[in-house]
Image: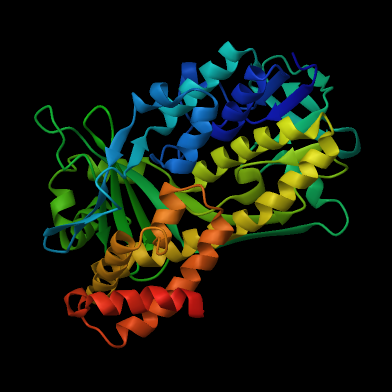
């Protein structure tokens, strides 16, 4: 039985999972969250984008023994279902028939992880806000929002899992030579929905639906109740932007022109459009993730990213898995452990941020491009013929635990090769067996 004490700020997905893992390992855990208990009050507005759970996330859930519980509320999505402007469909598998990403409800997963943390022995304190952080002591001043009383934490390590606007990180930002950046893209997002139709799904349930339209897009992920959670990604300003959609008639006209088949199954579109908030999309980078070896950031607090690779939650969960592995090795040398953690994870956090931004361009622009689709066919065939030598970037990121930084490096190498290939071939059907062998051989020449 460990005697270590851990304080975790933030009972979001990463904070709740880490608290579960720590308590299972025998640590004394106190988990503080300024919001209400999601098991009683749900989630606040603007935070219910569906989540795409993939291999890295499952690996961390396996570590906590939670695969089956989560699998019960997840729906397999085996590829992208593309919707063109006329409503014509085309399906692009993510990988092999066995490979899928899983749509899970943010609220359902949050409720499950909070419950598991409590059952594992963590002490949970909702409506408790971190007011001040004492970095050199690894302590925090916590205010109970119900009775306004305050308490000062005492633990071996203070963990900031408190999201993109982390209180712990903000305290670090006030220290000398602290590196921090935040950047917003010009797009915001708004959640909408497609309800169940005649007791069933209105669209194919085992796919992530995408309506790519160049500078913007609509996506839809399936829910267990046969509905779909939709997200509209649209610029804030300019032509075809949120600024142009001011009255219900504008919204209806926009969807009728750009997403006619979606509009046909969205009876509450205009009500939801004006009722639901428009939210920002931010990338946050910072370093170091610890000061004085007595505290550490994980998840969005350390590396918030845009959602276009479906890796935000998965990266946070991977933080938890690697955190626990290093904790096992550290022999209670927590300062050394957090140094090892940030050195290991920082390059991967930067890499997945870059991947997420570039995948937005792919999703909204390229997935309907003929040359891009032919290139994907060639890469899929390369992977089929030489599975140990050519692994597509999406496969590395989504279906393996290869480090994000290594996946990015290999992906950039493959991109240079494929650019040369596509100068000589228009269609995958033009390539011979010898051509495929020559392409793979180029990996060794790079």
Which residue is painted at 55% across and 38% down in the image?
Answer: 317
Residue 368 vertical placement versus 175 (above, below): below
Q: Residue 342: give x, y in percent of width and height.
A: 73, 48
Q: Extreme left residue here?
A: 198
Q: Nearer the viewer, residue 314 or 38?
A: 314
Q: Nearer the viewer, residue 247 or 269?
A: 269
Circle count: 0
Is residue 365 visible from the viewing direction of this image? yes
Which residue is painted at 11% across and 63% down in the image?
Answer: 86
Query: Quadrant of the image for the N terminus?
Result: top right
Q: Is residue 125 left or right of residue 333?
A: left
Q: In this view, does 14 lie to the left or right of 419?
A: right
Residue 163 vertical placement versus 435 (above, below): above
Q: Nearer the viewer, residue 211 or 348?
A: 348
Q: Extreme bottom residue here?
A: 424
> Which quadrant would residue 179 be assigned to in this image?
bottom right
Colouring: rainbow
Residue 317 vertical placement versus 428 (above, below): above
Which residue is painted at 39% across and 62% down in the image?
Answer: 392
Q: Residue 389: give x, y in percent of width and height.
A: 42, 63
> Which quadrant would residue 84 be assigned to in this image?
bottom left
Is residue 240 visible from the viewing direction of this image? no
Q: Residue 190: give x, y in percent of width and height.
A: 38, 48
> Which quadrant would residue 300 be assigned to in this image?
top right
Which residue is painted at 36% across and 27% down in the image?
Answer: 71
């Amino acid at each position: 039985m460990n005697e270590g004490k851990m304080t975790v700020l933030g009972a979001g997905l990463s904070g709740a999972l880490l608290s579960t893992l720590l308590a299972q390992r025998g640590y004394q855990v106190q988990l503080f969250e300024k919001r209400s208990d999601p098991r009683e009050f749900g989630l606040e507005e603007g935070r219910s984008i569906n989540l795409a759970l993939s291999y890295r996330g499952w690996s961390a859930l396996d570590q906590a023994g939670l695969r089956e519980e989560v699998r019960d509320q997840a729906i397999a999505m085996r590829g992208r279902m593309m919707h063109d402007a006329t409503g014509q469909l085309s399906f692009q598998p993510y990988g092999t028939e066995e490979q899928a990403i899983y749509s899970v409800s943010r609220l359902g997963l949050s409720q499950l992880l909070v419950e598991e943390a409590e059952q594992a022995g963590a002490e949970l304190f909702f409506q408790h806000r971190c007011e001040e952080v004492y970095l050199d002591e690894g302590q925090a001043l916590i205010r109970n929002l119900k009775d306004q009383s305050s308490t000062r934490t005492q633990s071996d390590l203070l963990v900031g899992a408190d999201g993109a606007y982390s209180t712990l990180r903000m305290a670090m930002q006030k220290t000398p030579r602290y590196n921090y950046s935040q950047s917003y893209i010009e797009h915001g997002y708004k959640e909408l929905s497609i309800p169940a139709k005649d007791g069933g799904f209105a669209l194919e349930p085992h796919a992530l639906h995408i309506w790519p339209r160049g500078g913007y897009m609509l996506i839809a992920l399936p829910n267990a109740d046969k509905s779909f959670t939709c997200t509209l990604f649209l610029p804030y300003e300019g032509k075809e932007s949120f600024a142009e959609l001011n009255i219900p008639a504008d919204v209806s006209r926009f969807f009728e022109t750009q997403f006619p088949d979606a509009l046909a199954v969205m009876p509450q579109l205009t009500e939801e459009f004006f009722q639901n908030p428009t939210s920002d999309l931010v990338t946050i980078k910072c370093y170091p993730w610890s000061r004085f070896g007595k505290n550490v950031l994980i998840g969005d607090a350390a590396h918030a990213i845009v959602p276009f690779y479906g890796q935000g939650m998965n990266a946070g969960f991977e933080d938890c898995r690697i955190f626990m592995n290093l904790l096992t090795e550290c022999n209670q040398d927590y300062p050394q452990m957090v140094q090892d953690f940030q050195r290991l994870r920082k390059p991967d956090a930067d890499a997945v941020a870059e991947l997420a931004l570039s995948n937005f361009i792919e999703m909204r622009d390229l997935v309907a491009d003929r040359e891009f689709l032919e290139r994907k066919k060639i890469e899929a065939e390369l992977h089929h013929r030489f599975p140990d030598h050519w692994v597509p970037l999406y496969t590395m990121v989504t279906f393996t635990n290869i480090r994000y930084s290594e996946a990015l490096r290999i992906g950039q190498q493959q991109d240079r090769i494929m650019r040369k290939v596509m100068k000589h071939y228009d269609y995958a059907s033009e390539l011979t067996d010898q051509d495929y062998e020559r392409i793979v051989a180029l990996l060794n020449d790079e």
